[in-house]
Amino acid sequence: MSNNQHAITGLQLSHQANILFITDGVCRDALDAEWIQFTGQQTLDPSVNGLGGLDAGTLQADSAYAVYAVKSTSGTVGAILSASFDPVLNPPTWPGSVAYRRIGSVMTDGNADVRAFTQTGTDRTRVVTYSGGLSSLYALQGGAASAWTDVDLNALAPRVSEQISLFLKANGGATLEVKEPSASHAQMATTSEVVYPFMVGPIGPHTDYRVPGPGTGDIAVLGYQEQV
């Protein structure tokens, strides 16, 4: 292990429709064996397969994709998009790649288009904030369960999320409570609306909710934080 392990500077994501852009920057690869450096902007087009695109297949609806910086055996560097968040256990199709590093992630919507987002952070901590309207970001609307009930957030945040920005709204005089599934008691309760930084637990992007009395509750995902 070197003193440079996990080092990363720059390599920030943005997009225009489904085309992704990556700024210049440098990072240590995932195995702490190589440096990967982009000296200019890189472009990712998921409609093509291979380096500079999706590793294989086509984008799927309501899915998470990892963005990797890669370096080939010949020294060529580039970026690639993959549904695999664990290249060791589930190797993507990266012909000739010798080094890789996940530098971010994106989510698709119900039409298999990249969800509109902005990414901030130029070191290991990256924060994704969704752009556009709230209507497409709900994981729960009109929830009225009086007992703790699971809400699956995987269509709106990748499993590598360490924190998810939840928008909680109580309707009709309700008290909306949420907690991480392994917790024994409510970690947040609201009678109006609030943005809550939800810490993701061991089972990934899931939250439990309940509405103990009258009324209903809504839960939306405004974005997430990850370590790259």
Image: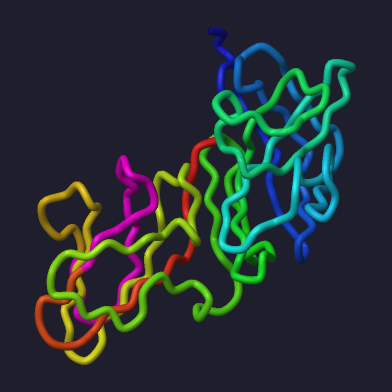
| Residue stretch in magenta | 189-209
Residue 220, given in percent of the width and then of the height, sits at: 41, 71
Q: Residue at x 60, y 75 (%)?
A: 132
Q: Is residue 75 left or right of residue 199?
A: right
Q: Is residue 130 above or below residue 52?
A: below
Q: In which quadrant will I find the C terminus?
A: top right
| Name of the residue lying farthest toward the front | 57
Q: Is residue 23 visible?
A: yes
Question: Splitting the image into 4 quarters, where does residue 32 fall?
Answer: top right
Question: Splitting the image into 4 quarters, where does residue 141 fall?
Answer: bottom left
Q: Is residue 54 above or below residue 195?
A: above
**Count of marks placed on residues:** 0
Q: Is residue 194 above or below residue 188?
A: below
Q: Residue at x 76, y 61 (%)?
A: 18
Q: Residue at x 16, y 78 (%)?
A: 175
Residue 118, given in percent of the width and then of the height, sits at: 63, 59
Question: Splitting the image into 4 quarters, where does residue 30 fall?
Answer: top right
Q: Is residue 198 magenta?
A: yes
Q: Is residue 80 magenta?
A: no
Q: Residue at x 24, y 84 (%)?
A: 216
Relative to the observer, which residue lies in front, 208 or 227?
208
